[in-house]
């Protein structure tokens, strides 16, 4: 272990990412408890020491604890890792607030923007659990690879540098490298909006297009994300880093990406509801797509790709027509 002394860490949420991080943290020598609201899920993990549905093949240490009791998980933990999908962050945080102590450290690992408020995940935590300190943890990191010890680099971001450094020390080891950032807002915008671009990349795959199309979508996609992110107060450098272009590349290119997989199905003619049913996991990009348009309106920033994704998702526009619309826009300079 490369970090501090052993800490008491609770992972709130037992999806693939929460489970992979719990495995990593146990390997780093920490006392880890995993919470889920689903009794069947906790029973399975306690009995099998494996999440056979979300992260098969990754064996969980016997020292790991599992619970459905939120008070037991939250009270007294040195670090809380909030790993529920973004649509459930506010509701879960509201329940956690009764048990969280003053100054308790919470790191959010969900990627999304709340549709109604346009809040990031740490903004939600700060509203619902004001007594806590928050850190965002984001970057190109598929659970399936982290759970097998594949080299990964990620970023811990907080307004207070020492909080990011604590999270860095707790998570970092010889295959999981953690950088720090003082731009948690920009990090979280990049992490949320890249899921919408990944839907577009998947749609292009589903339509049978190739590498040229993918490269165009990734490059123009980060252009959209960075323009909006900077207008909203994020730092330009953030979108050039791991939580911007890095996360966008991995999400657009990998079959581990639920957003890309859902996009492929949509490109093949399925609705977003049918695609999410087939993927059998929360497809964050569907939830972030409308929020992205809300931010675009707030900051008066055009988002051509994200606009077309919204039209395909929610206005039943044909994916092929959306791609043609993007290709036939008025001539312009690349940097404008």
Image (cartoon, grey):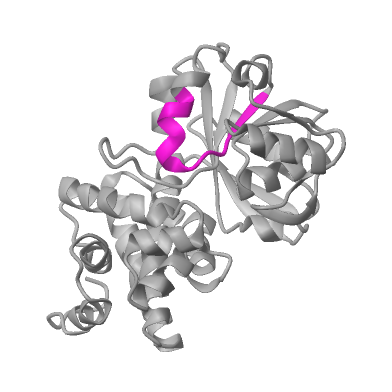
Residue 152 higher or lower than 187, as above or below: below
Q: Position of residue 164 (x, y in %)?
A: 59, 35
Asked if residue 151 lies left or right of residue 139, the reply is right
Residue located 73% across and 40% down the image: 44
Residue 287, relative to residue 335: is it above or below?
Answer: above
Q: Left or right? Give the position of 215 relative to 76.
A: left
Q: Locate the C terminus and report the quarter of the image it occupies.
A: bottom left
Instruction: Classify residue 15 by image quadrant.
Output: top right
The location of residue 253, given as percent across then percent down, is 52, 73
x then y, percent, for residue 130? 44, 17
Q: Nearer the viewer, residue 274 or 167?
A: 274
Tell me where the magenta segment starts and ends, as one range.
79-93
Is 55 in the magenta? no
Q: Is residue 113 visible?
A: yes
Relative placement, left or right, of 215 versus 82 is: left
Residue 311 sits in which quadrant? bottom left
Q: Position of residue 209 (x, y in %)?
A: 39, 87
| Total marks in image | 0
Residue positioned most to the right: 62
């Amino acid at each position: 272990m490369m970090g501090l002394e052993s800490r008491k860490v609770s992972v709130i949420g037992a999806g693939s990412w929460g489970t992979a991080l719990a495995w990593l943290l146990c390997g780093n020598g920490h006392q880890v408890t995993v919470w889920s609201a689903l009794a069947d899920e906790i029973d399975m993990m306690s009995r099998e020491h494996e999440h056979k549905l979300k992260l098969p093949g990754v064996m969980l240490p016997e020292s790991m604890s599992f619970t459905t009791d939120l008070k037991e998980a939250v009270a007294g933990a040195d670090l809380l890792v909030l790993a529920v999908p973004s649509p459930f962050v506010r509701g879960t945080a509201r329940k956690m607030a009764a048990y969280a102590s003053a100054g308790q450290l919470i790191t959010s690992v969900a990627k999304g923007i709340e549709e109604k408020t346009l809040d990031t995940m740490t903004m939600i935590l700060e509203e619902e659990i004001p007594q806590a300190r928050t850190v965002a943890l984001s970057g190109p990191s598929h659970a399936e690879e982290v759970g097998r010890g594949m080299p990964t680099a990620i970023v811990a971001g907080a307004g207070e540098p020492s909080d990011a450094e604590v999270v860095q020390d707790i998570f970092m080891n010889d295959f999981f490298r953690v950088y720090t950032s003082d731009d948690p807002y920009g990090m979280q915008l990049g992490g949320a909006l890249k899921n919408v671009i990944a839907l577009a990349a998947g749609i292009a795959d589903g339509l049978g297009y190739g590498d040229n199309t993918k490269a165009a979508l990734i490059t123009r996609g980060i252009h959209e994300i960075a323009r909006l992110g900077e207008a909203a107060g994020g730092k330009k450098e953030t979108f050039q880093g791991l939580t911007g272009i890095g996360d966008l590349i991995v999400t657009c290119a990998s079959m581990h990406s639920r957003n890309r997989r859902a996009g492929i199905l949509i490109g093949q003619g399925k609705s977003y509801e049918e695609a999410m049913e087939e993927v059998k996991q929360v497809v964050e990009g569907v939830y972030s797509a409308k929020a992205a348009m809300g931010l675009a309106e707030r900051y008066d920033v055009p988002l051509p790709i994200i606009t077309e994704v919204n039209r395909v998702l929610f206005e039943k526009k044909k994916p092929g027509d959306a791609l043609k619309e993007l290709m036939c826009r008025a001539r312009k300079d690349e940097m404008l």
